[in-house]
Image (spheres, grey):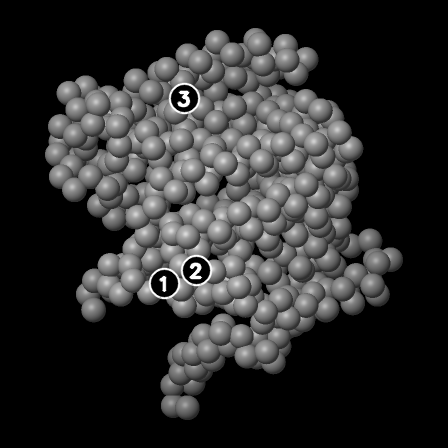
Amino acid sequence: MQANNSIKRSLGISVITQYIELAINFVGVMILARIITSEQIGIYSVAAFLMLLLHVFRDFGVAKYIIQEPDLTRERMRSALGAAMLLAGGVALIMYLLRYPVAKFYGEPQLADIMTVMALSFALTPIGSVVNSIYRRNMELKKVAVVRLSSVLASNLASVFLALDGHGAMSLAWANLANIVTFGFVAALISQGSVPLVPSFRRLREVLHFGSIASLGTLANVGGNNSAEVIIGKMLSLEAAGYFSRGNGMVQMFKNLVASAVQPLILPYFAALRRNSGDIVQPYRMAIAYLTGFTWPFFGVLAVLALPAVRTLYGPNWDASVPLVQILCIAGALSMLNMFAGDVMIANGHIKGFTRLQLSTQPLRVVVLIVAGTFGLFEMAIATAVYEGLLFAISSRALHRTSGISLSAVISATGRSAMVAVFSALGPALVMLFGSSLDAPLVLSLLGGIAAFAGWVGGVFWFRHPIREHLLHASQWLTSRILPGS
């Protein structure tokens, strides 16, 4: 019982941290969207993609090594720090040397300045990354929360003030540096000497060997997931990349609002199931049912309310993102079917199979996007949705082969969620139909959100979705607290 309570407290801290961080970023994005132009966002998105790609080599599984190592001595901690410093220094040098070729490739001189700041950011990451990984290993999630929230607050404050001062895309680069410096400083400050800050290289081979396989799959995943803006920036324009980035950012932001609270549980949960009974098919079906029961209604509602939502968050200058948001909501809904597949494969002991899956499917994403880019921006959004459908079909075969979970088992788990999504979208559709002449995006968003929630609750009960039982328990708990004698 005490262990369960400890896990619940840890998860509670993690969820609260994620949502506060999301709220801070949410406010920051709303402000920046009214200050920085779509072209400036597109310029930074190209550089950010390269940073994410190189980030895989900078980390190279060092954080995972720290978290999973059974006997993490101070010598191994120091070796992990040494490995992180060597990798970060090498990646920073690569980023610095690439600054002018990349700027010339895109015909945008400002990219060179942005990448110079990003190179400095890379060089300063190791201490914060290693110390925070040790906190995560020890389940010191309060310290993790302090580090994360301090850095994200510093980043958003820096970006807003610098953008107001007219620094454009450079304000985002300096904000990223502020994030990393704050992250490392706060992490080291609260360690109080419990974590060694002097590197060692005695066990360097051991650290790097562990991360080699996992890093291949991570590299393919990061490269594929963040390739759209880079392809759009080259094939269409940096302004188009900015519109796509904002539209996709809105979908991902709200997707994370629901999914980020669930994702950390999946790998340990299914690993425990495998150790105890080996039966994971029915729990996986239930996990998909719960996930789609929350997320599919959301994506349906966001697609209907895309216009007032975009204008509320970003302003009317970003109306070109509205049709992209609507199509990307379809892509987001399809991605939910595949969200847990990788974690289940890893939990079932098939990390090499998961890596092979990433190496085979992510290049497919790039090919699909390049083909769509010859037609236009809207077609690239459609291509994103098409790819998510293809990925689900391909990964389902791998999941069935490694874990015994069939395609039909997953699809059959989503029937009630689809009906709940339809119920949820009916109210917002009526709001948009009768309020189309109302030039008040915030009012339309609020009215649509209220109608959506009512439709969601009604759909959950009408179709007897598994979420229904949890809503009943929650209402009973609230009633007992509000009316103790009832």
Residue type indicated by callout 2: Ile
The numbered mark at residue 405 is 2
Q: How many marks?
A: 3
Residue 422 at least partly seen? yes
Residue 162 at least partly seen? no
User: In terms of depth relative to the viewer, which is nearer, 302 or 409?
Assistant: 409
> Does residue 101 sit above or below 399 in this rendering?
above
* Within-10-Å neighbours for mark 2: few <14, some 14–19, many 20+: many
> Under tag 2, what secondary structure?
loop
**What residue sits 74% from the left and 39% below the top?**
379
Locate residue 294, reporting x and y percent.
Answer: 54, 63
Label located before the other in sequence (3 or 2)? 3
**What residue sits 49% from the left and 65% below the top?**
409
* Within-10-Å neighbours for mark 3: few <14, some 14–19, many 20+: many
Write down the quadrant of residue 244 in the picture. top right
Locate residue 435, reporting x and y percent.
Answer: 82, 62
Q: CA distance from mark 3 to mark 2?
A: 40 Å
Q: Are marks 1 and 2 in contact (CB under 8 Å)?
A: yes
User: In terms of depth relative to the viewer, which is nearer, 81 or 413?
Assistant: 413
**Circle 1 or circle 2, nearest the eye:** 2
Locate residue 52, reporting x and y percent.
Answer: 48, 29
Please indicate whether residue 229 sits to the left or right of residue 282 in the image. right
> Under tag 1, what secondary structure?
loop
Please indicate whether residue 436 sits to the left or right of residue 140 in the image. right
Q: Which residue in the protein does label 1 denote?
A: 280
Q: Residue furthest bottom?
A: 486
The numbered mark at residue 423 is none
Q: Which residue in the protein does label 3 denote?
A: 122
Q: CA distance from mark 3 to mark 1?
A: 40 Å
Q: Residue furthest right?
A: 437
